[in-house]
Image (cartoon, rainbow, N blue to C red):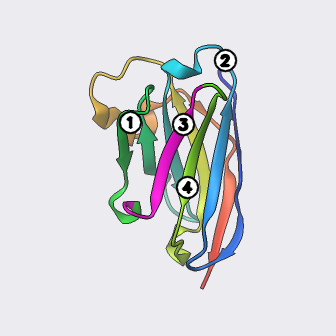
Amino acid sequence: QVQLVESGGGLVQAGDSLRLSCAASGPTFSSYAMGWFRQAPGKEREFVSAISWSGSSTYYKDSVKGRFTISRDNAKNTVYLQMNSLKPEDTAVYYCAARTRPVILPSVLLTTTGYEYWGQGTQVTVSS
């Protein structure tokens, strides 16, 4: 069983930055692929970013490329999402997700069904 706890959300103004953290339980965190998703009111949960177990491969939603950076510290069992130049359309609940099964095709990391474990989410609100 893997437990994920997100933190770092908040209320900011457009153009500001936030760094989200996701602390994971489990002795084999370094073998998990990790992802960040978000869900705005009335919308489906959508992919934001993902990172391979080693950190060597990263993936981003087109609208956040160049503004968001995903990283991980396997010694701390933590994955991060650095969000810069935030926009009102980034407002959502942000969820951390873990995939413990091997990744055959990277495209699986872009889908909600590609992950077995989810955190409870952290609210990010960007005012204009």
**Quarter of the image where the C terminus is located:** bottom right
Kindly identify the amino acid type of the residue bearing the numbered disc 1. Answer: Leu
- Pinpoint residue 43: horizontal percent, then vertical percent: 50, 62
Q: Is residue 19 left or right of residue 36?
A: right
Instruction: Please name which of the two marks, 3 or 1, marks the residue nearer to the observer.
Output: 3
Specify the segment rendered in magenta.
Answer: 65-74
Kindly identify the amino acid type of the residue bearing the numbered disc 4. Answer: Gln
Instruction: Please name which of the two marks, 1 or 2, marks the residue nearer to the observer.
Output: 2
- Please tell me the numbered disc located at residue 26: 2
x 53%, y 21%: residue: 30
Q: Hey, which residue is sitting farthest top in the picture?
A: 27
Q: Hey, which residue is sitting farthest bottom in the picture?
A: 128
Task: Write down the residue under mark 3.
Answer: 72
For the stretch drawn in magenta, what is the main secondary structure? strand
Label located before the other in sequence (3 or 1):
3
Label located before the other in sequence (1 or 4):
4
Q: Is residue 65 above or below residue 3?
A: below
| Disc 3 to disc 1, C-alpha distance | 16 Å
| Disc 3 to disc 2, C-alpha distance | 15 Å
- Please tell me the numbered disc located at residue 82: 4
Label located before the other in sequence (2 or 4):
2
| Disc 1 to disc 2, C-alpha distance | 20 Å
Dot 2 alpha-carbon crowd within 10 angstroms: few under 14, some 14 to 19, many 20 or more: few
Considering the numbered disc 2 on the image, is that residue within a helix, a strand or a loop? loop
